[in-house]
Amino acid sequence: MATYELSSTLARFLDKHLCFPLLEFLQDKGVYSEDDIMRAKIALLQNTNMVDFAMDIHKELYQSEDVPAAMMDRRTEVVNRLRSLQKAVDPIIGCLSNSNVIRNFRQDRTFNLQFLKEEFDIGPEQIEALYQFAKFQFDCGNYSMASELLQAYKPLCTISERNMSVQWGKLAADTLTQNYDAATEDLLRLRESLDNQSFATPLMQLQQRTWLMHWSLHVFWNTENGKNALIDLFLQPAYMSAIQINAQHLLRYLAAAVVVNRKRRNVLRELIKVIQQESYEYSDPITQFLECLFVHYDFDSAQQKLIECESVIEHDYFLTAIKAEFLESARLFIFETYCRIHQCINIDMLSERLNMDKGAAEKWIANLILSARLNAKIDSKAGTVVMGLQSSSMQDQLADKAKQLSVRTFTLANAVVGAPATKA
């Protein structure tokens, strides 16, 4: 299933350290040869400080204790750099380890710099060394320490561009330590900074939003409410534009999140519209499944695509954990859609559509009718499901109308409020 394998595409928008979990996953799955994966790891480590790790992989790959001279030279360079930075950063680390010092910090970062200079004779050189040391530790794979150092550096950073770099580093470090609560907060702060920055060109903002969505995959697929957050972020106009211009492949993850999230069926129409628009640029069995089912009402093709989806999800680092949930929700989509256009359904035929045996399909349908309170009954003798008229209650209809009015009112209010600013 390497045809639909996206790791090389995703890697273009990820920090090299964030690519490592993907390579480990592909190695475990055997999607590519062991030697190719190890060579990719060495290439990824080439410009990092994880020289010992690169040497170990090289020895394993070539079954030899000998390593290239360039690796040995790089190791010497890294050790010397570590000693130099450690010496430069010791005074400020000792100072910032004192809780009384941190207590005196304020929101005004210029005040903080002045306070450190007057009270502890710590100037710009030591503060710059703190940032460089954090970056160095990150490149060594010491992500927890890098996160702590960047957190200590943040109240002392007065340059907007550097502050953005710190936020990206903090997000990556917290993600790689699997501290997803902290990473979620980092993600929200970074998104706010990206959307409100004044120094970036439109092209730079487009690129940064594309990166943010890719980095967010590590967070959203590992947090409880992540799928909701992914849908909210990806469907924001600015971020959807970035997907359509730069990263149509992200539609796979948006589609998967919508399929498994039954509470977000309201965005299905918008999603399918985008999938249709971008199908000439990107499609895979997941997006094709939705097209077959909701655009063409081609249940045979939808069934085939669902079989292909199973393999695609199995070999996707971010989606593999939701395989069972996706297949269950997809079968529900097929059943609901089929029921809308048929009154009497043959269970044998439906079991084929759902890619299940007859007994399992009948049991699944019975449970669904009970849990979803559908107006339907199973005729076991005839082997059919008989659908009654499905109608929304007056309360549900009023609630839907109220939601639509709320959205229109919000849009109109934004247009009215934003009009003078645009004109100015």
Image (cartoon, grey):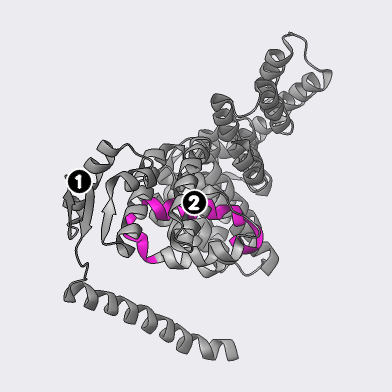
Residue 115 location (% of width, % of height) = 54, 53
Q: Give the range drawn in magenta.
A: 243-266
Mark 1 vs mark 2: which is more N-terminal? 2
Q: Label 1 vs label 2: CA separation?
A: 26 Å
Dot 2: within a 10 Å radius of its alpha carbon, few (fewer than 14), some, or many (20 or more) residues? some
What type of secondary structure mainly makes up the magenta span? helix
The residue to which callout 1 is attached is 367
Would you say residue 6 is visible in this rendering? no
Q: What amino acid is labelled 1 in the image?
A: Asn
Q: Is residue 153 above or below residue 22?
A: below
Residue under numbered circle 2: 301
- Quarter holding the N terminus is top right
Which residue is located at x 41 percent, y 39 percent? 323
Mark 2, secondary structure of its residue: helix
Question: Position of 13 compared to 180: left or right?
Answer: right
Which residue is painted at 37% across and 53% down in the image? 334
Amino acid beneath label 2: Ser
Q: Nearer the viewer, residue 308 or 271?
A: 308
> For residue 343, which quarter of the picture?
bottom left
Residue 217 in the magenta stretch? The answer is no
Q: How many neighbours does mark 1 have within 10 angstroms: few (below 14), some (14-19), or many (20 or more)?
A: few
